[in-house]
Image: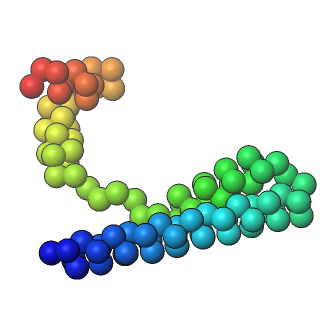
């Protein structure tokens, strides 16, 4: 048990060290881009963050949300644009 705990601790420390190394590299690259293109560090970091978020996969479909959407669609079927039940009202009423 003690050896397993020691191994987990060593893995956690290695992970933390790797993440810290990447963070420092990220800061250095952002500073280089800032100097090269004459932008602020805040702008550069924001652009890097936005691009990294765009590369992530979108979240998967939640079965509960799909169920609610289908029920709301069925309730609103045949109603005009201004007469439809809004999502929050539908949830509150059910």
Q: Determine whether, in the image, residue 46 is placed left or right of residue 35.
A: left
Q: How is the image coloured?
A: rainbow
Q: Determine whether, in the image, residue 22 is placed left or right of residue 88.
A: right
Give residue 21's quadrant in the image: bottom right
The foreground one among 44 and 51 is 44
Residue at figure coordinates x 85%, y 52% from the top left: 39
Q: Quadrant of the C terminus?
A: top left
Q: Determine whether, in the image, residue 53 is placed left or right of residue 79.
A: right
* As drawn, 20 above or below 70: below
* As drawn, 6 above or below 79: below
* As drawn, 76 above or below 11: above
Residue at figure coordinates x 75%, y 61% from the top left: 30
The foreground one among 62 and 16 is 16
Q: Quick check: can you spot residue 66? A: yes
Report how many numbered discs are placed on residues in the image: 0
Give residue 3's quadrant in the image: bottom left
View extreme (front): residue = 2
Residue at figure coordinates x 47%, y 66% from the top left: 16
Q: Determine whether, in the image, residue 66 is placed left or right of residue 16.
A: left
Give residue 27's quadrant in the image: bottom right
Image location (x, y in percent) of residue 72: 18, 35
Image location (x, y in percent) of residue 43: 75, 48
Residue at figure coordinates x 45%, y 74% from the top left: 14
Q: Quadrant of the N terminus?
A: bottom left
Image location (x, y in percent) of residue 92: 16, 21
View extreme (left): residue = 94
Q: Quick check: can you spot residue 70? A: no
Image location (x, y in percent) of residue 46: 67, 50
The foreground one among 9 and 90 is 9
* As drawn, 87 above or below 28: above
């Amino acid at each position: 048990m003690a050896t397993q705990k020691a191994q987990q601790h060593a893995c956690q420390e290695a992970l933390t060290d790797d993440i810290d190394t990447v963070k420092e590299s990220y800061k250095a690259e952002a500073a280089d881009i800032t100097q090269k293109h004459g932008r602020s560090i805040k702008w550069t970091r924001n652009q890097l963050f936005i691009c990294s978020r765009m590369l992530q996969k979108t979240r998967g479909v939640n079965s509960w949300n799909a169920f609610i959407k289908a029920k709301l669609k069925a309730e609103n079927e045949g109603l005009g644009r201004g007469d439809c039940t809004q999502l929050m009202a539908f949830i509150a009423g059910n």
